Amino acid sequence: MIIQYPILSEDTQFEQKDESTDTTAQINYNLNFEFDKDIPPLVKIFPSEYTSNPLDKDSGTEYSFSSQQRIGNPIYLEFGTNQVYRFELNLETIKTDGFVPEKYSLNLPFLSTNIYQVSLPRESDESNQSVKIENISPTPTKLLVNQEGNVTATFEVPANTDSNIQVSGYIWLEQKSLDEKLPIPNPKYTIYLEEIKGDPNLSRYLLPTDYWEVNDIYIQQEAKIYLVRTYIFLMLLNQYMDI
């Protein structure tokens, strides 16, 4: 269960003066939430400055945020150590090939194919996250899991017609309650960089990488060679089918 409440503007007035009586009234915007004892454990709360007190006869807990704590801060409370999410991914693959007829690529898909790589939700021991894929279409030609556990699926779809890639499923997420959580490390920036440089799996992200540009002369030449080869193949195929 998630509860959210809007921020209190920084220009909020906390007193109002009545000129006719020369009196001033103090205004507060304190916010209090009361929950019974049967509510699931609290796992997240923001802002971190708040007060909590038991209700009468230990019937529940009250969480309070003062007016000052609410200035510029949205209120967020999340209860429950288990969450289930449904996800749906839909990638439209636009037609990019107007050269090869569909009747040829139906029997010989390699004549007109686009390759897409899509990141999929993954299981994680660190966050106690498990994933179940309910549907994936078309069937990926390759699944790659890198050293960090990220999953990438490779799809081959027709380039001479519009289509789409669909993936759906569920994510189970288990998290500790607020009382059980360990403090988040907060090292100095210089120490943080040194730790990354010392880890070969992470240091590579600090290095520059090469990439190909679409206006690169080499890429343009290779594309022209591919088109010529495809054209020659189709000409030969037409002659063969006419026999």
Image (cartoon, rainbow, N blue to C red):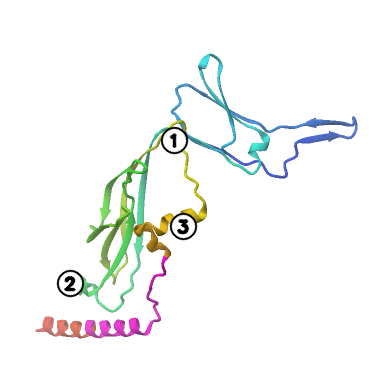
Residue 87 percent across, percent down from the top left? 36, 47
Q: Position of residue 212 (x, y in %)?
A: 37, 76
Q: Is 56 or 226 nearer to us in this picture?
A: 56
Using a 10 Å C-alpha cutoff, classify the residue at mark 1 as few (fewer than 14 neighbours), some (14 to 19) or many (20 or more): few
Q: Nearer the viewer, residue 73 or 111?
A: 73
Instruction: Tell me the amino acid under the disc marked 3.
Output: Leu
Query: Vertically, is 151 above or below 101?
Result: above
Residue picked out by circle 3:
193
Q: Is residue 50 magenta?
A: no
Q: Which quadrant is home to the C terminus?
A: bottom left
Mark 2 and mark 1: span between their CA atoms? 56 Å
Q: Earlier in the sequence, mark 2 or mark 1?
A: 2
The label on residue 181 is 1
Q: Is residue 15 above or below residue 147?
A: above
Asked which secondary structure carries label 1, the reply is: loop
Vertical arrangement, residue 111 with respect to residue 32, above or below = below
Callout 2, which amino acid? Leu
Q: Nearer the viewer, mark 3 or mark 2?
A: 3
**Callout 3: SS:** helix
Marker disc for residue 72? none
Q: CA distance from mark 3 to mark 2?
A: 51 Å
Who comes first in sequence, dot 3 or dot 2? 2
Q: Residue 240 placed where, x, y %?
A: 11, 83
Judged by depth in the image, the label closer to the viewer, 2 or 1, is: 1
Circle 2 residue: 108
Question: Which quarter of the picture shows residue 202?
Answer: bottom left
- Kind of residue at disc 1: Lys
Residue visible at 40% across and 77% down in the picture: 213
User: Residue at coordinates 66% horizontally, 31% vertically from top-left?
Assistant: 30
Give the magenta-colored segment's residue range: 207-230
Among the two numbered marks 1 and 3 on one chain, the one whose residue lies closer to the N terminus: 1
Question: Which residue of the protein is positioned furthest toward the left in this rendering?
Answer: 243
